[in-house]
Amino acid sequence: MNIQWYPGHMVKTKRQIEESLKVIDVVIELLDARIPISSKNPDIDELIKNKPKVIILNKCTLADENVTREWIKHFKNKGILAIEVDSMSGKNINKVFPIVKESVKDKFERKIAKGIVGRPIRALVVGIPNVGKSSFINKISNKSSAKTGDLPGVTRSKQWIKVNKEFELLDTPGILWPKFEDEKVALHLSYTKSIKEEILDIEQLAVKFIDEMKQKFPKSLTERYKIDVTKPSIDILNDIGRKRGCIVSGGEVDTLRAANILFEDFRTAKLGKISLETPKDEIEVENEN
Ligand SMILES: Nc1nc2c(ncn2[C@@H]2O[C@H](COP(=O)(O)OP(=O)(O)O)[C@@H](O)[C@H]2O)c(=O)[nH]1
Ligand SMILES: [Mg+2]
């Protein structure tokens, strides 16, 4: 992995987010509903200080609904507003604004009491690469929505995307770096395609993935591929390849193709709606630290 790239990037992002904080009321933190622990940037809460925050569990149609519900409850217990969303289908997109409004209620009510004229609530969307920041912004703003700066008579810079007359988003989302060092985190980010595949050995990754699937969701594998999941993971990968006709001359299995099929199936929920991380995993992580 090219870790050289990270320090400079981190400093720049941090500065950008700190700058943005001056002009926004609330931070919208996007997490991947399948991996809310691994897709969270560990420094974000410190970075945004005491700004109100709303958590979006994105790609929720790929995750297990019951686990997602547990996550929402878990955040609620911590006093954090959260909602599950799917930025492709648009599921729950219309529920985001009411929650955002709720998160800044105190601040705005105080302003109204002081007689300060109302203005739109302004939010910054943050999240790791590929979590769906652009998709979310496009969906919630109806894609073609004009930037407020484009309107005649509006002299403000073109940095706001209008969601409705009470709600605007900063047009450049904050791109955060995930927590790479932990192997489990790096693996989960790879399975969900948040780490570039070119830097990984896909076959090795598939074996690790099968290890986890065998332990947590063996039925997903048996139902999809009709294979024996009591075998070692490398044999399972070969069996998946055989079942899918990934055979090279000489009769050997093309395990690279098999691995790609497996990940494609996972990422498109053909193995079912799978949540790789539950709130219980977070509690375990907290206890380790
Ligand atoms: N199924 C599903 N895919 C999503 C969702 N949001 C984003 N994606 C996909 O995830 C990939 C990364 O999305 P993008 O918006 O570019 O992420 P960004 O890097 O955070 O801006 C794209 O292939 C999107 O189509 C979602 O809610 N559900
Ligand atoms: Mg983007």
Image (cartoon, grey):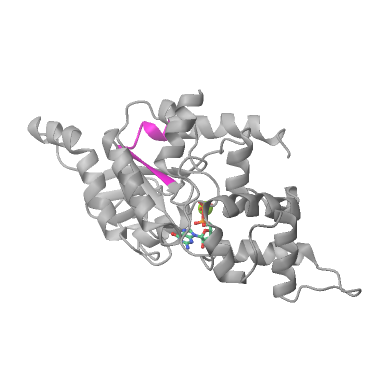
Tell whether position 233 is magenta.
no
Left or right: where 198 falls relative to 221: right
Q: Is residue 191 above or below residue 278?
A: below
Q: Residue at x 42, y 53 (%)?
A: 58
Could you say where residue 176 lies in the image, as x and y percent from the top left? 52, 39
Could you say where residue 75 lies in the image, as x and y percent from the top left? 32, 39
Q: Nearer the viewer, residue 139 or 99?
A: 99
Q: Nearer the viewer, residue 20 or 89?
A: 89
Q: Residue at x 85, y 69 (%)?
A: 252
Residue 43 is at least partly visible in this image: no
Could you say where residue 143 lies in the image, as x and y percent from the top left? 40, 64
Q: Residue furthest top?
A: 289
Could you say where residue 13 lies in the image, as x and y percent from the top left? 53, 35
Left or right: where 281 falls relative to 122: right
Q: In the rendered image, which quarter is residue 262 located in?
A: bottom right
Q: In the rendered image, which quarter is residue 110 located in?
A: top left
Q: Nearer the viewer, residue 251 or 36?
A: 251
Q: Residue furthest right?
A: 250
Left or right: where 137 falls relative to 209: left
Tell whether position 22 is magenta.
yes
Query: What is the span of residues highlighted in magenta in the rendered image?
Result: 19-30
Q: Is residue 91 above or below residue 47?
A: below
Residue 257 is at least partly visible in this image: yes
Left or right: where 86 falls relative to 230: left
How many discs appear?
0
Q: Residue at x 64, y 54 (%)?
A: 210
Q: Is residue 268 above or below residue 179?
A: below
Q: Quadrant of the N terminus?
A: top right
Q: Nearer the viewer, residue 103 or 229?
A: 229
